[in-house]
Image: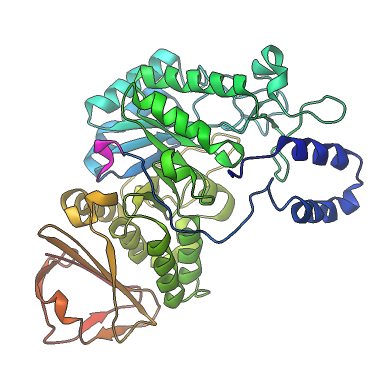
Amino acid sequence: MNKEINYNEYNLIVEIMEKLPLSILVLFLALAVTITGCSIFGKKKEIKPFVSDVVHPEWSKNSVLYEVNVRQYTPEGTFNAFDKHIPRLKSLGVDVLWFMPTFPIGDKNKKGELGSYYSVKDYLNVNPAFGTLEDFKTMLDEAHEAGMKVIIDWVPNHTSWDNKLTVEHPDWYVRDAKGNFTPPIGFDWTDVIQLDWSKMGLQNYMIDALKFWVNMGVDGFRIDHPNNTPKEFWERARTELTAIRPVMLIGEIEQPVDYLEKGFDMNYAWELYHLMVGIAQGKESVGKLVKYYNKEWKIYPNNVYRLQFLTNHDQNTWEGTIDSLMGEAQKPLAALIFTAQGVPLLYSGQEDCLNKRLKFFVRDTIKWDTCNMTGFYRNLISLKHKNKALWNGDAGGPMVRISTKQDSSIYAFYREKDENRVVVLLNLTKKSIALKSLPGNLNGEYTDYFGEIKTVLPLTDSLKFEPWGFKVLVK
């Protein structure tokens, strides 16, 4: 049974919460999770291996995603101003532009000066602060002409308080005991109200709205917080949307994995992200990474995509910059997400050493320049594109762990496809390491991709790694 929200339970909890003093609200929430079996907040359970029947768009086989924050991208904060960056991003190697929500933002109960992108007032229009629908279409066409695909953020869980659906279809929303709309439970999302996904009329409306954008030329959707939506809806959406054109559907979710069986192309590798932060800060070990991938390979079939990142809009704004969270570990961890199985994501400014946490509800423009990471990311993207071993899903090779005599410090693996092989050696510690040997099945002549020198296996001398050093050997 799918773990979408049980709206009878939801409404009951809303009614009870209204009557509780704040002092015992936290206790109630804990009891509610226990009593309902976590059905509202998502029950964490053992994940079992599964099969995915999703057929990914052909263009996604070696794609690299880039998240665009239109509001903060330029001083103007518009589609037209962003257009000027398309050639630069093309030269960086980006294939897919994911735009954070571009919809009009609700005014009622909005947060801050400009409100949250995720408070949607109209699913069929664009934020007038960003430009017009015609401006969006022009930008879309220019991205396509540059050989890029465009996906947009979709917000199905909730709307703004003043979305026209509150008047036209008030029955599509969760209500409290007094018949009032209610924000989602468990979050500080007071600027939005919870949709009731048990309503078939709502589901039909959402299908039509998704089709509106695909017919315009949009190539897919990143689905925000889909936890409370039925997986069957996304299976239906994939069928109806791909009848128009192949689309990519990315779910901002890690569990349950059944959304990946027939609906989503990709989900989020949240566990990997938090593990990388822990390793960078000395709180987690390389051994934990070994266990993570052992579990990953047992559960996820090779054809499934996993979204991997060092940052995104949430992490940057609410947790910190890459430098503050990962420090000198950024480069080896970037090398990991670009060479491991999965689809890498860059966030606005990441390629330009973004060194500040972008504010969410006001203007906070990125200052553009170049830095030592720009060429580094360009090289990683180029390797991802050109070497079939690193392609996504079944188009690429599976990861195979390499056991070394430095397994507590070095995480090593290789991937192989056709005549292509890539060996990745990552020193994920702040101490220098010397590696004296590698397994005989890897013997051959390689190019050290970043050192641009020949490396022959078996080794005749030790491979030396500085703290947080790494090597990517290409054959």
Indicate the position of residue 341 as horizontal and vertical percent values. Answer: 32, 57
- Region of the chain picked out in magenta, as a range: 56-61
Q: Residue at x 13, y 83 (%)?
A: 459
What residue do we see at 9% from left, 59% from top?
A: 419
Can you say which quadrant of the picture contains the N terminus? Answer: top right
Image quadrant of residue 187? top right
Q: In this picture, is 127 found above or below 298?
A: above
On whether residue 177 falls in the magenta region, the answer is no
Residue in the image at 11% along x and 64% along y = 475
User: Can residue 258 be seen in the rendering of this structure?
Assistant: yes
Foreground residue among 458 and 383: 458
Left or right? Give the position of 242 relative to 391: right
Residue 358: % across, % down: 52, 44
Viewer-nearest residue: 158 or 3: 3
Is 21 or 52 nearer to us in this picture? 52
Direction from residue 7 to residue 313 in the image, left or right: left
Q: Where in the figure is residue 344, as x and y percent of width and height?
A: 35, 50
Q: Is residue 92 above or below residue 23?
A: above
Give the left or right position of residue 169, taking residue 88 as reference. right
| Residue 74 coordinates in the image, percent (x, y) | 42, 32
Colour scheme of the rendered structure: rainbow
In percent of the image, x 37 and y 29: which residue is there?
Answer: 82
Per the image, is 60 magenta? yes
User: Is residue 324 shown to the viewer in this render?
Assistant: no
Residue 85 vs residue 44, the one in the foreground: 44
